[in-house]
Image (tube, grey):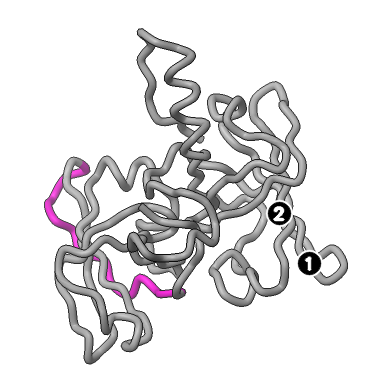
Amino acid sequence: MFTGIITAVGRISAIQDLGDSAAHGKRLTLDVNADYLADVGLGDSIALNGACMTVTTLDTANGQFTIDISAESLNKTCGLDRLNTVNLEKALRANDRLGGHLVSGHVDGQGRVRQFEPVGESWLLAIEAPQALAKFIAYKGSVTVNGVSLTVNQVRDEAQACLLSINLIPHTIENTALGTLKAGDGVNLEIDLIARYVERMLSPGTTTEAAQD
């Protein structure tokens, strides 16, 4: 489990194919401040842009670790298939503060940035979310964007998508990788965990799959 409070910004510095076909995944090497890895061990969970991954090798002295990501996970996420700056969060401890909201690290769908621009001292981030996720997104509700716990300031249902707007304060821009976004970029979305279970309880006997962009 996670909280959506980013604890570091890292960079995917190398990508290695784990096989010779599209059915194989990739091994990602990530660079981060060496101090960040002081309490990390092999097998620990770290969320990359909101996707929970497992540490497979660890080089604390040089501030590097690797994760193996499956073809399925690559297909369901954005930003983990290229050299890129990513948001990192270590798994939640039982005695940690829950500063954001309960986050599972499972991406529910891919959104698309429609607008990202300064408004006063803050930034307006408008995202087109898949229509299938619309019922889980509410005004003043929580949503996770590339691993960051955020509050929805406006939501509007459209013919082909759900448009949600978020206000990003300067602290968020300075301490996450969201400041690098631009119109047209894909983002990983995770809906509120409670909304997910409420929907399941209200719709017994149905089959649910991850939404696509």
Q: Secondary structure at mark 2?
A: strand
Residue 195 spot, x, y in % from top left: 52, 31
Please give the count of numbered marks on the rendered protein: 2
The residue positioned 22% from the left and 85% from the top of the image is 60
- Indicate whether residue 12 is drawn in magenta: yes
Tell me if 32 is positioned left or right of 151 in this view.
left
Mark in front: 2 vs 1: 1
Furthest residue toward front: 95
The disc placed on residue 122 is 1
Q: Amino acid at mark 2?
A: Leu
Q: Quadrant of residue 21?
A: top left
Judge the density around disc 1: few (<14), some (14-19), many (≥20) Cα neighbours within 10 Å: some
Residue 40 spot, x, y in % from top left: 24, 75
- Indicate whether residue 133 is drawn in magenta: no
Furthest residue toward bottom: 61
Q: Amino acid at mark 1?
A: Ser
Residue 185 spot, x, y in % from top left: 58, 53
Q: Quadrant of residue 52?
A: bottom left
The residue positioned 54% from the left and 25% from the top of the image is 132
Which residues lie in the magenta part? 9-22
Q: Main secondary structure of the magenta part?
A: strand
Which of the pair 22/181 is nearer the observer?
A: 181
The residue positioned 51% from the left and 39% from the top of the image is 191
The disc placed on residue 65 is none
Judge the density around disc 2: few (<14), some (14-19), many (≥20) Cα neighbours within 10 Å: many
Above or below, 24 relative to 173: above
Q: Secondary structure at mark 1?
A: strand
The disc placed on residue 125 is 2
Residue 23 spot, x, y in % from top left: 18, 41
Disc 2/disc 1 C-alpha distance (Å): 10 Å
State if disc 1 and disc 2 touch (CB < 8 Å): no
